[in-house]
Amino acid sequence: QVQLVESGGGLVQAGGSLRLSCAASGFSLDYVHIGWFRQAPGKEREGVSCISKFGGTTYYADSVKGRFTISRDNAKNTVYLQMNSLKPDDTAVYYCAADAVRNAQNMCTMIRARYWGQGTQVTVSS
């Protein structure tokens, strides 16, 4: 019943762009901070970008600053991650996650959240 479903992943060339979407069902995004995480094979999961309940606060990992933009549309119960200037190092499974208690910065830096999606694959070729 409580679900986060990611979409928008795919295969792109370096320098290209993708927009990921995360649609929530079973609960309202009005009540949670939400963010994007990624995990590449053999690597630890990392926080990419997180946004506060009403969008007033955002966090970005240093590796994506200036290239990625997180946004949310609570009316549509959806959060987005616009990814520009993609690099091969961005290749990973991208997950969205939400938490009603942990704020955006803590979510991303501590890699902690209550609700997690199943992920969408992003592959960036050289």
Image (spheres, rainbow, N blue to C red):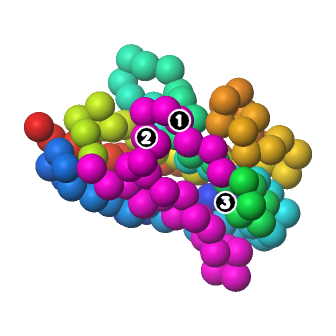
At 70% from the left edge and 75% from the top edge, which residue is drawn? 74
Is 110 in front, or is 25? 110
Q: Most extreme residue toward the front, as rendered? A: 66
Q: Earlier in the sequence, mark 3 or mark 2?
A: 3
Q: Are marks 3 and 2 in contact (CB under 8 Å)?
A: no
Residue 82: within the magenta? yes
Residue 29, image quadrant: bottom right
Residue 40, image quadrant: top left
Q: Which residues are magenta?
A: 58-85
Is 46 in front, or is 86? 86
The CA distance from mark 2 to mark 1 is 6 Å
**Is residue 125 rendered to the left or right of residue 60?**
left
User: Which residue matches tag 3?
Assistant: 3
Identify the amino acid type marked 3.
Gln
Identify the amino acid type marked 1.
Ala
At 23% from the left edge and 35% from the top edge, which residue is drawn? 88
Disc marking residue 64: 2
The CA distance from mark 3 to mark 2 is 26 Å
Residue 56: % across, % down: 74, 61
Crowding near the residue tagged with mark 1, few <14, some 14–19, many ≥20 C-alpha atoms within 10 Å: some
Secondary structure under badge 2? loop
**Is residue 24 rendered to the left or right of residue 65?**
right
Q: Is residue 48 visible?
A: yes
Q: Are marks 2 and 1 in contact (CB under 8 Å)?
A: yes
Quarter containing the C terminus: top left
Q: Is residue 5 visible?
A: no
At 53% from the left edge and 27% from the top edge, which residue is drawn? 45
User: Which residue matches tag 1?
Assistant: 61
